[in-house]
Amino acid sequence: MLNGMQLLDLMRETENKMLHLHKAIDRVSTEPEFKESVSVLTEVVQDYQGQLDKMKHALRNVEVGQQQHAQSQQNNTYQ
């Protein structure tokens, strides 16, 4: 399982790939002969977006897990 920093790095890398794909889509979308390529690139972007959503969800769980651990330690200190 990835830690929070690894998830952030992976998210940045994925967002960077999506940015390049969006630029490619913008360039070829006006060309009728690239209609099929635009469809494929759009599907790839949607897949990346799904991966990003999963990573964001996992990152939220990591943050919550760390907060709970910190609270648990804090409670043990006060007892």
Image (cartoon, grey):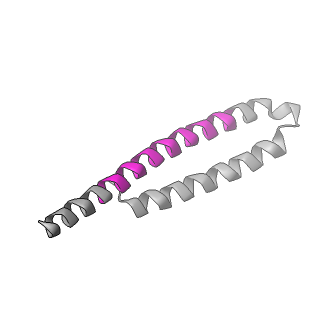
Q: Where is residue 9 in the image (x, y as percent from the top left)?
A: 49, 61
| Snapshot quadrant of residue 16 | bottom right
Q: Which span is picked out in magenta?
A: 40-66
The number of discs equals 0
Find the residue positioned furthest to the front: 78
Q: Which of 44 and 51 is in front in this view?
A: 51
Residue drawn 19% across and 65% down? Answer: 73
For residue 71, above or below residue 59: below
What residue is rendered at 26% in x and 63% in y? 70
Q: Quadrant of residue 5?
A: bottom left
Task: Residue at 88%, 37% (x, y): give it.
Answer: 30
In which quadrant of the rendered image does the C terminus lie? bottom left
Looking at this view, is 11 or 56 the one in front? Answer: 56
Relative to 26, say whether 20 is above or below: below
For this view, does 18 lie left or right of residue 32?
A: left
Give the farthest residue toward the bottom: 77
Name the dominant secondary structure of the magenta segment: helix
Q: For this view, does 2 lie left or right of residue 33?
A: left
In the rendered view, would you say 1 is above or below 28? below
Picture coordinates of residue 49, whole percent (x, y)? 57, 41
Residue 8 location (% of width, % of height)? 48, 59
| Left/right of residue 45 with respect to residue 3 in the rendered view | right
Query: Which residue sits at x=64%, y=49%?
Result: 18
Image position, residue 68 (x, y; %): 27, 55
Q: Nearer the viewer, residue 31 or 9?
A: 9
Is residue 38 rendered magenta in the image? no
